[in-house]
């Protein structure tokens, strides 16, 4: 059994970087994946967010790049990591720089919502490691700024999130441009059928590493549900945040406008709060995350854009102000707490229209949320009890492929290039139970690149 990084066959510069970061014991996915990746195998990793999978693929990739030194061709890269959101792309790029600080490799990150010229300039020089979101990468490819002829390593991270956000078509297009001879890795927290098919197309004889059963939630999280009428949710949240034990809280809403309203209401009540969602500029989003991480802001209100893009220790509570209508999103939302060995609390507010979503979450995670009946705003309309197995069936539509005009959409090309992206549509949702009107963050297709996620 591998209990120390020193037992892994990692070169001294990587060991030194790990020592600086005080990494001593690898997580299960790191211990299981790194030896296979150092040997050049393709890998399918099934792991929840927060299990250390970035280091699991970054460390062996850095080592193999150094072992085979060569200059990346102009406009190309030696390794490509695809990830669904800007925040996650930035986070992964920072991890590569941290682990590879003694190696002298060139890294870059590409996403929309910012000017493309610095990204074009970086590509022109050739890049060892490129972290990118799919849409902006495709835009630059179509403009002639990206080639893949120097690529040897390919990582698809958060594959199920790519599916939920409607990016799988883009992923397939990018994969079609890649050299056949490469080492490929795919990571996903869940394995819906579409991802299983993608595995068959992308990976060759992969090693399968599964550190937790698919779709289970972190055991250290105390998961609770409070039944409350929709009109009382803000008052309930404000009352709960009076508890000084809630030192750092992340609140998830279903819509961008909802996030703004909740944040403004809390701020008026004297609670330091910021909101982060698709209508915020990249600079505003980074500032909000920085203030939250530094403790300047106690509460961060977010849409699902942040469900997998926040890697901040010390989040004591996650509040599902709106219960997600895609049950897998619940797993990723609450995974923002109980990180780095800590414990955490996840509290979901459930109004009468959301009981079907609650039932789907409990079915997916195979556990019941603890009902907190005693609070200041018990539900009057819709009842304050768990739904029967077939309850609310008319409200919750089967999940489709998350494409089409499903209300407020998340931008497929990260808000840049040729306006191919998914932006903020105002239609009614047609999948994932999105029947709340035009203010869902689903996958609505419009031509606005300015409202990128």
Image: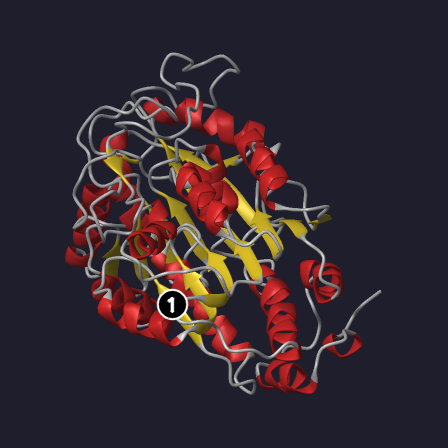
Q: Nearer the viewer, residue 291 or 154?
A: 154
Residue at 26%, 72% in the rendered image:
118
Q: Tell me where residue 173 appears, x and y as whole percent.
A: 43, 43
The residue wearing badge 1 is 75
Position above or below: 149 against 127: above
Q: Nearer the viewer, residue 70 or 4?
A: 70
Compared across the picture, whether 384 is left or right of 80 comes to left
Q: Nearer the viewer, residue 320 or 182?
A: 182
Q: Tell me where residue 375 appears, x and y as whole percent.
A: 38, 39
Compared across the picture, whether 395 is left or right of 408 comes to right
Residue at 63%, 86% in the rendered image:
13
Quarter holding residue 126 = bottom left
Compared across the picture, whether 182 is left or right of 117 comes to right
Position above or below: 133 against 12: above
Quarter holding residue 83 = bottom left
Within-10-Å neighbours for mark 1: few <14, some 14–19, many 20+: many
Quarter holding residue 392 = top left
Position above or below: 82 against 198: below
Would residue 130 be seen by someone viewing this image from the given angle?
yes
Would residue 313 be seen by someone viewing this image from the given angle?
no
Q: Tell me where residue 94 appears, x and y as whole percent.
A: 45, 73
The color scheme shown is: secondary structure
Compared across the picture, whether 361 is left or right of 300 comes to right
Q: Quadrant of the N terminus?
A: bottom right
Residue at 37%, 20% in the rendered image:
383
Q: Secondary structure at mark 1?
A: loop
Position above or below: 329 against 148: above
Q: Nearer the viewer, residue 282 or 65?
A: 65
Q: Tell me where residue 12 appears, x and y as whole percent.
A: 69, 86
């Amino acid at each position: 059994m591998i209990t120390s990084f020193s037992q892994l066959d990692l070169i001294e510069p990587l060991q030194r970087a790990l020592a600086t970061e005080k990494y001593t014991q690898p997580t299960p996915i790191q211990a299981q994946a790194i030896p296979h990746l150092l040997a050049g195998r393709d890998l399918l990793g099934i792991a929840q967010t927060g299990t250390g999978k970035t280091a699991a693929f970054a460390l062996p990739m850095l080592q193999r790049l150094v072992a085979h030194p060569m200059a990346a061709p102009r406009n190309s890269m030696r390794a490509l990591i695809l990830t669904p959101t800007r925040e996650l792309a930035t986070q992964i790029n920072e991890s590569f720089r941290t682990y590879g600080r003694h190696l002298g490799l060139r890294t870059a990150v590409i996403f929309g919502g910012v000017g493309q010229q610095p990204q074009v300039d970086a590509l022109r020089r050739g890049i060892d490691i490129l972290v990118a979101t799919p849409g902006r990468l495709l835009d630059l490819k179509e403009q002639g700024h990206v080639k893949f002829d120097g690529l040897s390593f390919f990582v698809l991270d958060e594959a199920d999130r790519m599916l939920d956000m409607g990016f799988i078509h883009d992923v397939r297009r990018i994969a079609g441009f890649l050299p056949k001879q490469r080492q490929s890795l795919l990571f996903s927290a869940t394995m819906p059928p579409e991802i299983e098919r993608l595995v068959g197309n992308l990976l060759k004889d992969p090693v399968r590493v599964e550190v937790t059963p698919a779709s289970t939630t972190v055991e250290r999280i105390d998961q609770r549900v409070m039944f409350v009428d929709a009109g009382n949710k803000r008052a309930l949240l404000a009352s709960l945040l009076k508890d000084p034990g809630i030192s750092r809280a992340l609140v998830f809403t279903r819509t961008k406008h909802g996030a703004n309203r909740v944040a403004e209401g809390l701020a008026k009540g004297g609670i330091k709060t910021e909101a982060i969602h698709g209508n915020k500029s990249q600079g505003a989003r980074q500032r909000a995350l920085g203030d939250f991480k530094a403790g300047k802001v106690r509460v961060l209100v977010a849409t699902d854009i942040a469900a997998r893009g926040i890697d901040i220790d010390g989040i004591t509570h996650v509040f599902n102000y709106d219960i997600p209508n895609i049950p897998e999103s619940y797993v990723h939302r609450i995974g923002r707490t109980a990180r780095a060995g800590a414990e955490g609390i996840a509290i979901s507010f459930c109004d009468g229209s959301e009981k079907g979503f609650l039932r789907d979450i409990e079915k997916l995670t195979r556990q019941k949320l603890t009902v907190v009946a005693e609070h200041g705003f018990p539900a009057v309309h819709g009842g304050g009890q768990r739904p029967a197995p077939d309850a609310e069936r008319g409200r919750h539509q089967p999940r489709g492929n998350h494409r089409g005009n499903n209300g407020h959409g998340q931008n497929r090309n990260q808000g840049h290039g040729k306006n191919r992206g998914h932006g903020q549509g105002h239609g009614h949702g047609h999948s994932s139970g999105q029947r709340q009107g035009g203010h869902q963050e689903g996958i609505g297709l419009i031509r606005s690149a300015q409202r990128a996620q």
